[in-house]
Image (cartoon, rainbow, N blue to C red):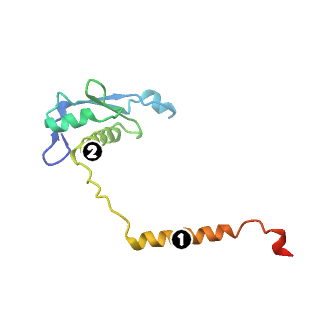
Amino acid sequence: MLEVSRQIVINDDELELQAVRAQGAGGQNVNKVASAIHLRFDIRASHLPEGVKEQLLALRDKRISRDGVVIIKAQEHRTQERNRQEALARLKSLIKRVLYAPKKRVPTRPSKGAKKRRIEQKKQRGKHKALRGKVSRQAID
């Protein structure tokens, strides 16, 4: 059972976990031990609230297929159990991402003093750069 929040719990029968061989380098062990985990979670068939389902399906995430199935492959760790925990943690974070809406940004304006200081700094910088110019021949003589 995966507890996403107090109200949302995913039963084990909704999750499909399959052990597969990990890809990439790893020596002799990687060729004979199925330590990677494929996690499949069907959003539409789950018992998640309808609002959460809609938000998950609306996400532009490469892990969610067109059929509404979340596919996560965890293969970072050497043991099957740690990869299983990693896959479940990733699913949990994916669902949590849609649960809480980000705070709306309240637009602010710079104060008059801040604007004045900014303009003064720009003027000072401009004067400094103007002094870098070539010195004319008449000014030397």
Neighbor class of circle 2 (other Cα within 10 Å; few <14, some 14-19, many 20+) is some
Percent x, y of residue 93: 28, 44
**Numbered circles on residues, count:** 2
Q: Indicate whether 87 appears above or below 114.
A: above
Provide residue 130's location: percent of width, then percent of height: 67, 67
How crowded pointer 1 is (Cα within 10 Å; few <14, some 14-19, many 20+) is rated as: few
Q: Residue furthest bottom?
A: 141
Toward the viewer: 32 or 109? 109
Q: Earlier in the sequence, mark 1 or mark 2?
A: 2
Q: Gap between marks 1 and 2, in whole Å?
A: 42 Å
- Give residue 41's quadrant in the image: top left
Q: Mark 1 is on which residue type?
A: Gln
Q: Which residue is mark 2?
A: 97
Q: Are the residues tagged 1 and 2 within 8 Å (C-beta)?
A: no
Residue where numbered disc 1 is placed: 121
Front in this rendered view, residue 57 or 109: 109
> Which SS class for mark 1?
helix
Residue at 31% in and 27% down? 65
| Residue found at the far right of this picture | 141
